[in-house]
Image: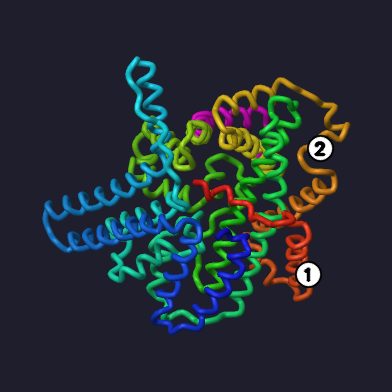
Amino acid sequence: MLFNSAEFFVFFPIAVLLYWVVPKKIRYIWLLIASYLFYMSFHVRFVWLLLITTGITYVCGLGVEICGKKEGRGAALEKKLIVAAGVISNLGILFFYKYTPFFLENVNRVLGRLGMQAFDSGVSVLIPVGISFYTFQSLGYLVDVYRGDIKAEKNPLKYALFVCFFPNLVSGPIERSTNLLEQIRNIPDRKTFEYRRVANGLIVMLYGYFLKMVIADRIAIVVTYIFDRYYELGSLELITGALAYAIQIYCDFSSYSLIAIGAAQVIGFTVMENFDTPYFAPSIKEFWRRWHISLSTWFRDYLYIPMGGSRCGKLRKYLNLMVTFLVSGIWHGADWSYVVWGGLHGMYQVAGDLLLPLRQKAVQACRVKTDCFSYRFLQMAVTFLLTAFAWIFFRADTISQALLYVKRMVTRWDFWTLFNGGLYELGIDRFEANILLAAIVAMLLVDLVRYFRKQRIDVFLEEQNFWFRWMVCIGLFAAIFVYGIYGPSYDASQFIYLQF
């Protein structure tokens, strides 16, 4: 049941209306039922995995809290062993379902090089939807209980709702127990209906649908056309493909996050922001503070800092950075191309830190003004181009394909494409391309408001006159209805991050 499917357009209002109608004390039970129905619409047979993850971390959380009330070294050791058991068992489940074929394939390559008999690598494992997201959310809760940031949840149904809350279940944001679980605990004390909250949530959802159906799904046609024919296209087309994919994945993933945030807001919950104008970041370090915030902060708090972070000297700091980004890469998918993508971002940060003194000296020597728009714009442009370059490895099917793509991109210059209309013939016609360009301009305007005024679209519109607010909302709805990507028998396009 994708967010942009007809089934969800029926399911969501029913779920919300019943949530408002049922008694406050049992509302969490209805949300739990609705969340499991939502998940079962993808794969009924994988519900048991969700139950196992929930059960393991629930029991481990209680065990950690019980041990925390004891004294002595034995209790501290017991706490660590319980947490270790919870982490290892859940990561083991994640590894089996997501990485078994990848692992066997690489083991067989090594065995083949050594002249040894290979394993049967014809294993086919269907990856359960959202397993990476709800696994990390559950493990975050367990570590939070261990650290004493939150009390273990005694009610198994409330904890189960925290793990499977349907707006952010399958593609995030990866919520923290200190935020979402606390809200679940306080459901009886929350207001049933607030017009402002519901209206703003619907506006956020509407803008999310605009990003997905008008921009992401349309530009995906261009990206697919270019990446499928990279071996016969020239440099400008391939550069266009790389830049187009950077826009596609941003609009696609941020659209899911916005719909999830808006849906939660309509129900009455506040879910953490996941994107904050990442392509306006002046550095790769700043980019990761703005991109997929829930995941980047998860890795920071539960991997990078526990390894020592930046407190252990420069060499160890750089090692911690590389490990964190390599793990982030493999989290996204079982392929070496994702590892390369993560490694590139780790190298960007290490190189940026190492070259900082040299850059500062060069700026001073050349008397470059740093407190002006032109300098900051240059930083943003360089950061965006570095990010777009790394996306090539993320999008390509294999590392070799990505390398060939890059090779052609820098060796097959075809400047005449700028003048012969070739850029208007990349999978969509001129009319569709103009719609896409206009929609991207609209997206940039919204991001500029977010960047300069620090306001999400719903908050910004709330401050405007009634006529302007309705004009924007009607315009977004009309754009989705008229220019959204539909077919004769409409089939909702899958969100990119569902595969992770």
Q: Quadrant of the N terminus?
A: bottom right
Who's the residue at 59% across and 51% down the image? 495
Residue count near mark 2 (Cα–Cα under 10 Å), binned few <14, some 14–19, many ≥20? few
Mark 1 residue element: helix
Task: Specify the amino acid type for callout 1.
Answer: Met
Check if residue 41 falls in the magenta segment: no
Who's the residue at 78% across and 60% down the image? 482
Question: Where is mark 1, residue-wise?
Answer: 471
Q: Residue 337's x, y, as percent?
A: 52, 32
Decide which of 245, 40 is in the foreground and name it.
40
Residue 190 relative to residue 197: left or right? left
Q: Residue 423's x, y, as percent?
A: 80, 36
Q: Which residues are magenta?
A: 349-370
Looking at the image, is mark 2 or mark 1 earlier in the sequence? 2
Q: CA distance from mark 2 to mark 1?
A: 33 Å
Q: Which mark identifies residue 496?
A: none
Label 2 with label 1: CB-CB less than 8 Å: no
Decide which of 105, 313 is in the foreground and name it.
105
Decide which of 491, 395 is in the foreground and name it.
491
Question: Where is mark 2, residue-wise?
Answer: 425
Residue 123 relative to residue 79: left or right? right
- As displayed, is residue 228 above or below residue 171? above
- As displayed, is residue 431 above or below residue 196? above
Q: So how many labels did they put on this image?
A: 2
Task: Specify the amino acid type for callout 2.
Answer: Glu
Please tell me whether the stretch drawn in magenta is mainly helix, strand or loop: helix
Q: Residue 473's x, y, as percent?
A: 73, 68
Residue count near mark 1 (Cα–Cα under 10 Å), binned few <14, some 14–19, many ≥20? few
